[in-house]
Image: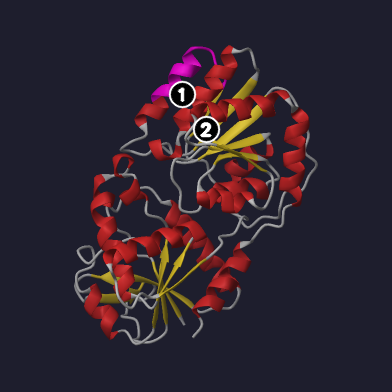
Amino acid sequence: MIYWDTTKTGKKNYPASGIKRVSDRMVDELQKSGQNVILVKWDKRLKTFNSRSDRNPISNEGLFITPEIFEEHDRPGFMTWAKEFRGYKVAIFHDVIPIRFPQITWPDSVARHPHYMKLIGIAFNQVLAVSKASEVDLLGYWKWLQIENMPLTGNLQWGADYDGMQRNKSKYSVSRPLQLLQVAILEPRKNQNLSLNACETLWKQGLDFHLHIAGRKNQHFGAPVVDRIRELRKAGHHVFWHKAPNETELRKLYANTHLCLFPSLAEGCGLPVIESLWEGRPVLASNLPCIQENANYGGVEIFDIEDPSSLTDKLHKLITHPNSLETLAEQARTAELPTWEEAATELIRKTTR
């Protein structure tokens, strides 16, 4: 019996998050493997978790897993419930971004995250991070807090097969104009402006290529990116914004892409990197620790996030040397990538006691 927490923190009408996307994908694979997964939600009145299907309180035993970010204030009575629950409690940890980069994070998240990171350190039996880099960050923060009797930790590798479809292993060919793609919510952390600035420099040098930005606008921080896209379009440059594409639309974008960009300033996992590789598309990405973990599969060119000209220089090389692109694409096409089925199997293996 697996109780999977789906309780959302914050406004009910807020767009679906990346956490929900990977959570839904994991639950789907767990159910396919025969696991009895019950989706649950916190009941503030009863101060316990209820099944979403029949709204009855869950039993006091079993495996409880939460991928959500919350603190005691969001779920009054949670600590009491956690002490009384006789089953095994597992938290999936994503990143320390609100603490490390508060200037580009929504204030509510900045205020909540320290409490959340402490809570999972004292209320859970085990915490699994979404990358080795995130696990290191988490342990460092717990050490700074001087938490005694830390829970067991580890890390999980998410799957590359984002939509459950077969991998694209078709032959890659370079055609002109080249099509570049960046998939991410529009916000400072995803660093679309660095991509736009680099592309503008190369367009002014006479290079011919198209840039596609795919993702919804962050309602708090995304407007400047949209303004920049409009500015470049008005100047006659080939940049296109695809607002919140669904999985089918995203797959079509990948199919028509020659190179994916991932210039993030901060990440816990960097999942779009291996999703791009799943589609047989090479990636030009920043040198964050978690991204370099994914770059080890092959098909990824790394640039120095501390040096903005590094992206421009690497991009210029790849656009003007198609053989380099084809070499990276072949690595992407043949890389041995993790799947969500394997991720679900690993989750069960690591949480079975």
Q: Give the x, y percent position of residue 257.
A: 66, 35
Specify the quadrant of the image occupied by residue 81.
bottom left
Disc 2 marks which residue? 213
- Amino acid under label 2? Ile
Rendered residue at 56%/62% (across/down) = 157
> Residue, x 39% and y 73% (percent of image)?
53
The residue positioned 42% from the left and 84% from the top of the image is 62
Taking the view exactly as shown, the residue that stands out farthest to the right is: 171
Question: As displayed, is residue 336 above or below residue 282?
Answer: below
Circle 1 sits in a helix, a strand or a loop, which is it?
A: helix
Left or right, 139 with reference to 314: left
| Horizontal side of residue 225 vs 122, given as left or right | right
Which span is picked out in magenta? 227-238
Please state which amino acid type lies under the numbered disc 1: Ile
Residue with the mark numbered 1: 229
Whole-percent x, y for residue 52 in the image: 37, 71
Residue 2: % across, % down: 46, 78
Q: Is residue 235 magenta?
A: yes
Question: Observer-nearest residue: 243 or 91?
Answer: 91
Badge 2 marks a residue whose secondary structure is strand
